[in-house]
Amino acid sequence: MSTKNNNKIEENGLVEYQVWDKTVRIFHWVNVVLITALMFIGFIMMFKSELGISGLPAKIKLKELHTVIGYMFAINLIIRLVWGVVGSHFAKFSKMRPKTAEVTAYKNRLKKGENPQYLGHNPIGKFAVVAIMALSIVIMVTGLIRAGTDIYYPPFGGAISHYLAADNTDPALIKAYDDTGVNLDKKASMKPYKSLAGDIHTYSVYLLLLLILLHIIGVIIAELRHQPGIISAMFSGKKSISGQCEDSFD
């Protein structure tokens, strides 16, 4: 038997809802893979000496690999940001606005032994998603800035190489980690901003790691104690819910 929005009533009385569309699910798992790869390469870059990796060519190759994966991360994130405006109901960011009052009410109901059911994210989940998305944007922007200042990669590399080029020097000839043809005064003036972008990038990644860990723990707890099917829904897009939902497709 079916209900509106192509929902289906199962034999055990649960109602199956199609919640997460394919774009959201693909973004989620591609993001998991790319973030894992970026962090893996990032830690190799940070501890390359301890790992026995030395020499400028190796340093540049690691930067280039990190940047190429970063481009894929940026494209995936931008698609999700656009989809958060024009996508399906629960893909939209307007449905993810976190509210502290909702979190308090949700916690109080859990303490009473209730299990409020949500089609989209529960109130705590909304905070986690918004925080992760915001940090991802910061990491993307600062990463692109460092790609431009370190190895002169787009979208900022062209402008930076033009700025740093000494008089009568073709900016296209400037090479990564090579001061040949570089105006050293301009390079020195840019260093504090480059360092700031790098620090923001690094500490944002650390904070993202913490948030992801807390997110995973929260999802597992919710799956086991409060609303089974949250994890599988990010594969199938479907949630099976018993009783009344706290949110809807309206």
Image (cartoon, rainbow, N blue to C red):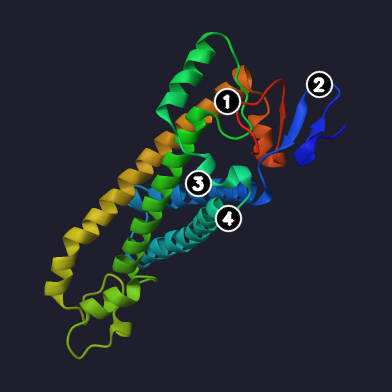
Residue 1 versus residue 114 in the image, above or below: below
| Residue for badge 2 | 13
- Residue type at the position of mark 2: Gly
Query: Which numbered disc flags the more N-terminal residue, 4 or 2?
Result: 2
The x, y position of residue 211, in whole percent, is 43, 35
Evaluate if marks 4 and 2 touch, with contact meaning CB atoms under 8 Å apart.
Answer: no
Which image quadrant for residue 116? top right
| Residue for badge 1 | 220
Q: Is residue 137 left or right of residue 168?
A: right
C-alpha span from label 4 to label 1 = 30 Å
Q: Is residue 207 left or right of residue 82?
A: left
Seen as rendered, the residue at the extreme left is 185
Front-lying residue, 201 or 7: 7
| Residue for badge 4 | 86
* Mark toward the viewer: 4 or 3: 4
Evaluate if marks 4 and 1 touch, with contact meaning CB atoms under 8 Å apart.
Answer: no
Residue 158 versus residue 122 in the image, above or below: below
Seen as rendered, the residue at the extreme top is 112
Q: Is residue 212 left or right of residue 54?
A: right
| Residue for badge 3 | 36
C-alpha span from label 4 to label 3 = 28 Å
C-alpha span from label 1 to label 3 = 19 Å
* Mark toward the viewer: 4 or 1: 4
Which image quadrant for residue 245? top right
Residue 43 versus residue 55 in the image, above or below: above
Q: Secondary structure at mark 1?
A: helix
